[in-house]
Image: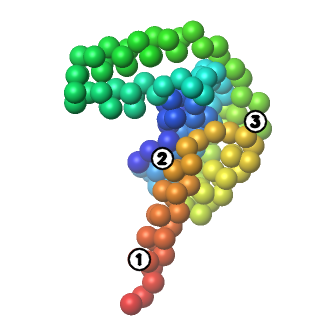
Amino acid sequence: MSYCRFSSDAFRCDVYAYGDVSGGYTIHVAARKRLVPDDFPDPLATMVEMVDADPATAIARYNDLNAAMVAFPFVDLTAPSAGQTFHCADLEDFKAKMLDLRAEGLRFPDDVLDEIDAELRAEETMSTPG
């Protein structure tokens, strides 16, 4: 299960984080990314909003937005963890690493932490007798 991808938040996310099929959690930190303006619409979200009403227009808009992104310059990330991969054994370590990455100035959606917290609460409930 993916918590966030480089394409999350209209390609502004610096982190790809997921539950690893081998167990634990894996976090890849980008070394560089496109400098997407904050007011640029998310291509996928835009398509999803439009697809039921007009699939052809939704796909065309998605393709137009993706094509426009090519003009955005790449920037190197300067955070200490840029370009690195981390493996975390459990949710607590995973959350701690994600918070460390955020403290370095790396970007990922806020709902990632909410999702981790919900899973931690679920684990706690399952391990509590009674």
The one of 39 and 120 positioned closer to us in this rendering: 39
Q: Position of residue 93 (x, y in %)?
A: 62, 60
Answer above or below: position of 72 versus 84: above
User: Which circle's residue, 2 or 3, is located before the other in the chain?
Assistant: 2
Q: Amino acid at mark 2?
A: Tyr
Q: Few, some or many C-alpha atoms within 10 Å of disc 3 (few <14, some 14-19, many ≥20)? A: some
Cβ atoms at labels 2 and 3 below 8 Å apart: no
Q: Who comes first in sequence, dot 2 or dot 1?
A: 2
Which residue: 28% across, 16% down? 57
Where residue 50 appears, as percent x and y from the top left, is 30, 27
Q: Nearer the viewer, residue 11 or 97?
A: 11
Q: Secondary structure at mark 1?
A: helix
Amino acid identity at mark 3 = Ala
Q: Residues within 10 Å of mark 2 (few under 14, many from 20)?
A: some
Q: CA distance from mark 2 to mark 3?
A: 20 Å
Vertical order, 40 against 120 (above or below): above
Residue 70 pos. (x, y %) = 53, 11
Task: Categorize mark 1 by other alpha carbons within 10 Å: few (<14), some (14-19), many (20+).
Answer: few
Q: Label 1 belongs to which residue? A: 126
Question: Residue drawn at (74%, 48%), measured in percent from left and top?
Answer: 103
Q: Which mark is residue 17?
A: none
Q: Amino acid at mark 1?
A: Met
Above or below residue 30? Residue 59 is above
Identity of the residue drawn at 69% across and 46% down: 101
Residue 111: percent from left, percent from top: 51, 50
Mark number, residue 3: 2
> In front: 85, or 100?
100
Mark 3 lies on residue: 79
